[in-house]
Image (cartoon, helix red, strand yellow):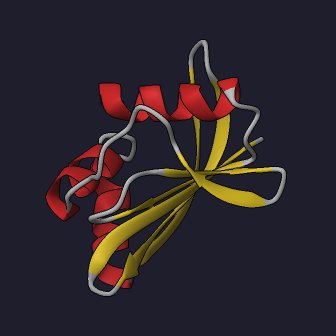
Amino acid sequence: MIDTQMKKLLHSIVEHRASDLHLHADTEPHMRVEGKLRPMPGFEVMSANYLKDTCYSIIDDDSQKEFEDTNELDFAISVEGIGRFRGNLYKNMGNIAAAFRII
């Protein structure tokens, strides 16, 4: 089941008419608006463990295993009442990172 924090993040990029959401460990979430990355207002720095838990809340066990085996995962999700998104999980300096694009 999708984490409440992830729902808030995805809802926020839709509200701000951003094209992308970028998540990296030990930094605040960023969104791309009019081609520029900007910190997302109202969101705090996400630790590596918290970010991993948040990202794992949107993928199933098989996808988690694939990510752990390959250090990269492309997928699509639909969040009721918010929208559809393409997601990419990857490793950045040994920690999980993620990018989401509204489709």
Please indicate, yes or no, whether residue 1 appears anywhere in the rendered image. no
Residue 96 percent coordinates (x, y): 32, 69
For the point 51% across and 42% down, the residue is 40
Q: Is residue 57 left or right of residue 59?
A: left
Residue 32 percent coordinates (x, y): 69, 53
Name the residue at the bottom extreme: 93
For the point 15% across and 58% down, the residue is 49
- In the image, residue 31 above or below residue 63: above
Residue 62 percent coordinates (x, y): 33, 57
Residue 85 percent coordinates (x, y): 65, 41
- In the image, residue 93 above or below residue 72: below
Q: Is residue 43 left or right of residue 101?
A: left
Q: Is residue 56 left or right of residue 83?
A: left
For the point 25% across and 57% down, the residue is 52
Please indicate, yes or no, whether residue 97 appears anywhere in the rendered image. yes
Name the residue at the top extreme: 81
Label count reads 0
